[in-house]
Structure formats: C-alpha cells, structure tokens
Image (cartoon, grey):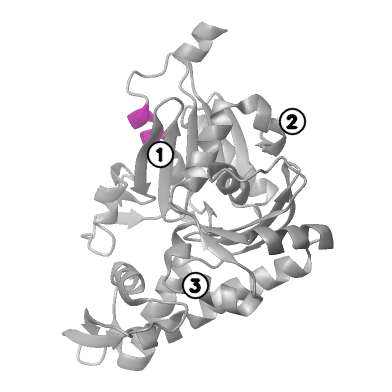
Amino acid sequence: MPWFGFLSNDIGIDLGTANTLVYVRGRGIVENEPSVVALDRSTRRVLAIGNAAKQMLGRTPKDIVAIRPMKDGVIADFEVTEEMLREFIKRVLKYRFLVRPRVVICVPSGITEVEKRAVRDSAEHAGAREVFLIAEPMAAAIGIGLPVEEPSGNMVIDVGGGTSEIAVIALSGIVNNTSIRVGGDEMDAAIVQHLKKNYNLLVGDQTAEALKIKIGSGYPLEQEIEMEVKGRDLVAGIPRTLKISSVEIREALNEATNAVVEAVKQALERTPPELAADILDRGIVMTGGGSLLRGLDTRLRQEINLPVNIVDDPLTCVVMGAGKVLENLGRYSKMLMKSSKD
C-alpha cells in the first residue's frame, strides 16, 4: 500500500557499544551519537543522552550517574537501552509516528538467542512495529557495496567498540564468522592499566581514548610521537602531568591487537579453499572505528600476507548497510535474522 509506506518511517539502527547511528529511509543518516545515558541516581530519570551525556562521563556529582548501557556489543542494561532507543526514535521521527516504524538493528554475529530477544524487546517497547536483526559484518559488507549475493567469497573485519568480528560472506550468508569481545573499549582499558601500573597515574576512559586516537598504533610508526597526559598521582593523590610516547601506548595495546590478528588467522583457517582463493584475489576489507587505529592494517598485512584495505568511511558503513536493507527488504530478507515472536 503506497500510503502505508508514506506514513511509516522505517529506521536502521547500528546499536554500537561506543556509538549509536540512526538511518531513516529516504533521509540517510540522521543521528550519530555516543551510546551514553545520564540518569538521576535516585529516580532513574533520564537527564541526557548521547553527546551531552558523554561529556558527563567521569565528571558527575553524586546524584547523577552517566552509564553506557551497551557492553561488548550487547545490552548490559535493558531499561536504559530502551530509554536510549526511545529517545533516538522520537528525535528522528518528529511527527509522532502515524504508523509505528519498522526497524532494522545491526547486532554482533556472535549474539545469543537471549541477547537477540533483549534487543528486539527493547526496540518494540521503544516504539517499533516490527524488528529485524542483521549481523554487523553482513550490514558492513552491504554498506560498502560488496557483492554479497554472488558465490565469490568476501572477508570483512569489523573492529567496533566492544567486539571485533571477522566474517567470510558468500551467497547472501555468513560462511564462517569469528566474534571476539575485544575492541576499542578493551584498548582504552589497556592504556588505563598501563599508566596505573608503570607510572601510578590514574586517568579516565576519555583520556585513554584520546591517547589511543592521537598516538596509539598497531605497528611501529615512521616517526614516533609523544603526548602530554594529565591524571591523578596515586601515591601523592594530586594531579600530575606526564609525557608518554607512542612506543609505550603501542606496547599497552599489544595484547588487544594480537587478539584481533589471531582471530583473523583462525577465520582464515576455517575458510573453505575455494573461498580462500577469492579472498587472496580480492583482499580483506576492514570497517568499524577500531580499524582507524594507526598501522593496524599494516600489522595484519604483514602477519597474514594478504591485501588488507580500510574502507573510506569505516564508522558509518554498518548503518549504511542497514539503510540499503530498508530500501529493499525483499531483496535482502535472506540476510536478516528475522525477529518474530514464535
């Protein structure tokens, strides 16, 4: 029914551990905000969501708590995720929907049945009429225009905030996937630990993230760089400034980058030989915010001896894939984990 499509606003959501992106059919990406919610500690009332809430992380007074309801790519706090989804849906559909929207949500490929149900229920309670789930590597492959329906093999590495996923895709399906709960968050935590252990300096997650972005790397840099970091001295108990080099940050990140490399090797070992030959020709595609870590692609190239390419916009290709699925649900229905109440 054409009028039905006109009234309904279908939405694609990349519900990430670090950021949530929202795509509205016919309008493109309309929201890209951190997955953070600030609550009143006693009443649990939502005070801020997204960027406004992220600025409060680690800085809140006693009666406010800023939390990230997603952990390792899945829902850690059900109620808060629901509030966050409701707010995002409300923001993007200004005229309180005449027809409740259909929603496509991108989830980690290693998600359990229980976690699937939690995502679906959250979206339904937040106002969705119908919810479809799609695996993040599949959405990323569709988003960057890989020929997912063809018999040739494509390998996608999606390094997100909570998970890293390596999937081999052919004939509209995931032939094999390796999902590890190592991503940007794990890297930030490793930097916090490194500074604490070696310098008795306590820094917050946001400072650790800034260090990772500015001087972090997965492979030796041509020219190593330094950065000043401010934190609290754990011995003296007072604020202190320290100069830290990219070499040390790389050392701190080594365990996390090794885990990604090992997961890619495992995925390649499990790939059928015909598809492995395709990957050798086409190379491997990297997406997700974690793929922006300097030199991670070089490190992978050296370890596995295959071409590795980072896509042009690694942060948005998953939600763009969800958007393409929305525009043509019939064509992509085979790739969805259709979420219906059985």
* Label placed on residue 342: 2
Q: Which quadrant: the C terminus?
A: top right
In terms of depth relative to the viewer, which is nearer, 61 or 110? 110
- Magenta residues span 84-92
Mark 3 highlights which residue? Answer: 296
Q: Is residue 264 magenta?
A: no
In terms of depth relative to the viewer, which is nearer, 300 or 27? 300
In terms of depth relative to the viewer, which is nearer, 314 or 275? 275
The answer for how far apart the CA atoms under marks 1 and 3 are is: 35 Å
Mark 3 vs mark 2: give the one in front.
Answer: 3
- Kindly identify the amino acid type of the residue bearing the numbered disc 1: Glu
Residue drawn at 53 percent across, 8 percent down: 2
The answer for how far apart the CA atoms under marks 3 and 2 are is: 43 Å
Residue drawn at 54 percent across, 38 percent down: 322
Q: Is residue 78 visible?
A: no
Q: Which quadrant: the N terminus?
A: top right
Residue drawn at 26 percent across, 54 percent down: 64
Mark 1 vs mark 3: give the one in front.
Answer: 3
Where residue 297 sits in the image (x, y, percent)?
51, 70
> Looking at the picture, does residue 330 appear above or below residue 30?
above
- Type of secondary structure dominating the magenta stretch: helix
Side of 310 relative to 237 (left or right): right
Q: Is residue 149 visible?
A: yes
Mark 1 highlights which residue? Answer: 83
Secondary structure beneath disc 1? helix
